[in-house]
Image (tube, rainbow, N blue to C red):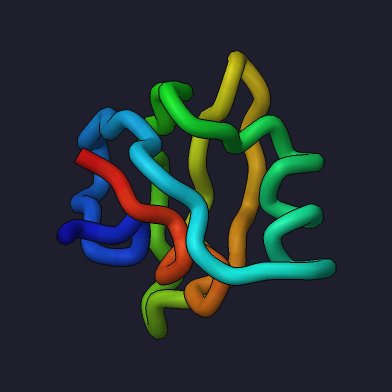
Amino acid sequence: MQTLKEAKVGQTVKIVKLHGEGATKRRIMDMGMTKGIDVTIRKVAPLGDPIEVTVRGYELSIRKADAQMIEVK
């Protein structure tokens, strides 16, 4: 299992599953990150937090802890 946190800069991955529950999962889904969506990793901060991604044409920042809950392939 690979998570969004482990994806490399410039890589485009497809979301397989969202782990977690409650407010955290809802926050991720509110960003437009749902099963089957392609996500491109644009940039990772020097300490790894946050991770900047492109989702559905929007540029977003996601926390490392949240990115670890998104399973990708």
| Res 34 quadrant in image | top right
Direction bottom: furthest residue: 47
| Res 20 quadrant in image | bottom right
Q: Quadrant of the C terminus?
A: top left
Q: Residue at x 42, y 23 (%)?
A: 36
Classify residue 27 as left or right of residue 34.
Answer: right
Q: Residue at x 16, y 60 (%)?
A: 1
Residue 8 point in image, percent of width and height = 20, 51
Q: Residue at x 44, y 56 (%)?
A: 70
Direction front: furthest residue: 21
Residue 12 point in image, percent of width and height = 27, 29
**Number of numbered labels in the structure image:** 0
Q: Residue at x 71, y 43 (%)?
A: 29
Residue 39 point in image, percent of width and height = 42, 31
**Nearer to the camera, 1 or 52:** 1
Residue 54 point in image, percent of width and height = 52, 30
